[in-house]
Image (spheres, rainbow, N blue to C red):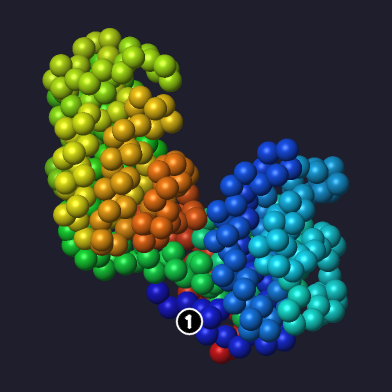
Amino acid sequence: MAILAMADLDLAGKRVLIREDLNVPLKNGKIVNDARVRAALPTLQLALQKGARVIVMSHLGRPKEGVPIAEQPDSRMAPVAAHLSALLGREIRVMPQDFAAEASKALVPGDCVLLENVRCNVGENDNADAIARYYATLCDVFVMDAFGTAHRAQGSTHGVARFADVACAGPLLKAELDALDRALKNPVRPLLAVVGGAKVSSKLQVLESLASKVDALVVGGGIANTFLAAAGKPVGKSLVEAEMIEQARRIMAQTHIPLPVDVVVASEFKEDAVATVKAVDAVTADDMILDIGPQSAAALASAIAKASTILWNGPVGVFEFASFAKGTEVVARAIAANPGFSIAGGGETITAIEKYGIEKDISCISTGGGAFLEFVQGDILPAVAILEARASGSESGTILR
């Protein structure tokens, strides 16, 4: 896709406003998982190396729009700024909500500051022109680098790109878009996708889109139960969407979907429930399917080993419970061992990747959840579309190299 890249621009002395996704989980004011902060570091470091005056903005949590940050202390960006300071080895100050264009011009090359939580700003969520124009006054170059929010048309993701003199993609955003293009538009085949989750309905568009693209589609979790029911297999009291059975059959007619031949069942959904391995055809009315069995896991591992491109979103069982985690672990380790190209996205998927310590073995780990799924199902990401429009000259502003 034709998008101006930050890496190609001369940023020396420029005010560079970078939208990152620094929405990290906090507990007692401390960052629990800093993966998103670490993912943003290369972009910030590159901008600083190029001699830019860097202004970073992000949201954090779910603050109330229009309510002063002083009244929402849990939404302050201070913990993120402190962590960024430690990682970058320089002080990162948090700028107040009334940070003005004149103040941004007072920054010097090598400075890096962080704006207070953008979702407190009036008009941010509605992508109002007023807030978008305000952001544009703070910069000479706007950099969209937050793939995780690219599916939202908001002031700090979309609107500012309309009014900034120069609008471009940061390295993190560009890398994720390139990886998704590589997996979905120009894959080295065979292309295999693993999609897990509770409900077919929540991922119906993803499944339908992938069915027309992949050579094999592995379904897991509650989704697999619905497909088993569609294939006429007993599922007991497992989570099943009866209203989705016909859609499941339609998808099964489009592509190869390897269904489990054995499963791990329990009589109730509890961490300490007794786990029993059964052949699929032996599932009784009192059984609840919570994982795939060892034979099915081994078969999936074999199929994954033969794939050249793998897209992974979601576990194949209730991997939060030790007794029902083996299937997801086998699939995860098989993907990690595959020498081909792999891309993974989604909150539960990233949790599994971290749980099994395979971060370095996945070609690309997407920082986006909703954005990842929307891209896979073929939706237009507003923040990406505006960058494409700017690069083509069909939107306002100037495009300068």
Q: Is residue 10 above or below residue 214?
A: below
Which is nearer the eye, 49 or 191?
Answer: 49
Circle 1 residue:
392
Is residue 327 shown to the viewer in this render? yes
Name the foreground residue: 372 vs 344. 344
Instruction: Pinpoint residue 279: horizontal percent, then vertical percent.
Output: 15, 22
275 or 224, which lies in front?
A: 275
Residue 275: give x, y in percent of width and height.
31, 18
Which image quadrant: the N terminus? Answer: bottom left
Q: How many marks?
A: 1
Residue 301 placed where, x, y %? 21, 44
**Secondary structure at numbered mark 1:** helix
Please give left or right for residue 108 compared with residue 233 in the image: right
Q: Is residue 227 left or right of residue 336?
A: left
- Residue 238 vertical placement versus 97 (above, below): above
Residue 112 drawn above or below residue 331? below
Question: Residue 218 appears at what percent x and percent y?
Answer: 24, 43
Q: Residues within 10 Å of mark 1 (few under 14, many from 20)?
A: few
- Residue at 74 percent across and 42 percent down: it is 29
**What's the residue at 80%, 64% (across, down)?**
93
Single out the residue that lies furthest toward the top: 286
Q: Quadrant of the C terminus?
A: bottom right
Q: Amino acid at mark 1?
A: Ser
Q: Evaluate whether residue 212 shows in this view.
A: no
Q: Which residue does the image show at 66% across and 78% down from the upper left?
A: 48
